[in-house]
Amino acid sequence: MKITAIEACILTVAPPRPMALDFPHHTLVVAQIATDAGLQGLGYSLVFGGGGAESVLAYLETRLKPLLLGEDPLAVEKLWEKMYRGDRGVRRVGIAGMALSALDIGLWDIAGKAAELPLYKLWGAVRDSADCYGSGGWGSYTEKDLIGEAEHYAALGCRYYKMKIHHPDPEVNRKRVAAVKKALGPGVSMMVDVNQKLDLAGNIRQAALLEEFDLVWYEEPVNSDDNAACAEVAAAIRIPVATGENHYNRYEFRDLIERRAARYLMPDICRANGYSETLKIGHLAAAHGVRVTPHVVYELSVQVCGTLANGFLVELMDWMPPDLFEVLPQCVNGVIRIPERPGHGMVLAKGAVAKYRSG
Ligand SMILES: [Mg+2]
């Protein structure tokens, strides 16, 4: 089998309220890979909030796509290495990591279709569904927005809800968490996300105020480039730390693990160099008793949780319009059943490219 063409574009999608208060739109950099056997692979990188999508597309088109044309798409590992090592002066983090991710995801989609298996079974299944958590709780939400969203996820059966703690006053954050906790009751556990906004002292102060809520995790406490500071926070607070959505490869995750900087690692398949690298990160974490809870794109991430015994929750962000994908996996009783269609199972809906294409 040979790759005959790769069509790439940007889709721009507006999320509904209240998420749109923080993000007027998200973008997907999409790569549709065609083969001479008639099999097609869909890869995409979710560019959360949209910033940088044009650069991801440009790097994919000009630097990575030429490396794949004419190659056998089933040699996924070989092609990953080729893309990873293509430009010596460009590290596969940030923009380049996101571009590589989209193509790796598309290659695996072809591999699954060729094997006539969903990816989690191709890789060896450990479960056929993944527990999920409702995620959102953005900084611009009113308390009413927060509770409304949390109750929406609880009504879907989610037993976990994660909210942002972005207010500069830690006491305000405590009050917002308390209000949501009270509304949800004891059946729903909570997590909080700092999104890199605090330093060591700020995190110690904030986490101490949140101890009473028995939080599952405390996420991305410091600048994500600073693994040493993350490790200091992890050692200093009593709530388990989660991080990794802005880490891009096995080496960065190895450093987090060796420093004991987090009990939960959160690779993003669309950033961390695709399924290929995310699986390596997951197995590395398993060797250290660390759990993996992939960042967003739950519709793709469920495949990873389906094959990793140390896979924990996928992140349900309920924002995609119903006419973007043919079928979007749904949360039922807090659980997302992994698609049984060959590959990752995601197919763009008819007319989605025409409707959402931009740039
Ligand atoms: Mg986060």
Image (tube, rainbow, N blue to C red):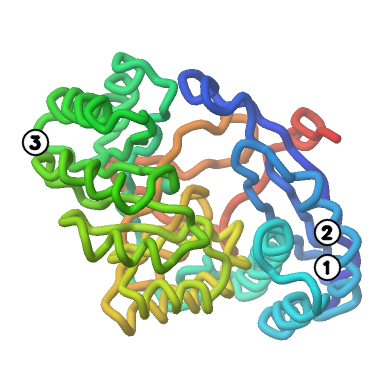
**Residue under label 3:** 186
Q: Residue at x 33, y 79 (%)?
A: 286
**Residue under label 2:** 59
Which picture quadrant has residue 294?
Answer: bottom left
- Say whether disc 1 or disc 2 marks the residue closer to the N-terminus: 2
Q: Position of 69 compared to 350: left or right?
A: right
Q: Residues within 10 Å of mark 3 (few under 14, many from 20)?
A: few
> Where 237 falls versus 309 (above or below)?
above
Q: Residue at x 38, y 33 (%)?
A: 166
Q: Secondary structure at mark 3?
A: loop
**Circles 1 and 2: CB atoms closer than 8 Å:** yes
Disc 3 marks a residue whose amino acid type is: Pro
**Residue under label 1:** 64
Residue 220 appearing in the image = no
In space, the residues marked 3 and 2 are separated at their CA atoms by: 47 Å
Q: Is the CB of the residue bearing disc 1 within 8 angstroms of ligand 1? A: no
- Expressed as whole percent of the image width and height from the top left, the position of residue 273 reads 62, 67
Q: Residues within 10 Å of mark 2 (few under 14, many from 20)?
A: some
Which picture quadrant has residue 126?
Answer: bottom left
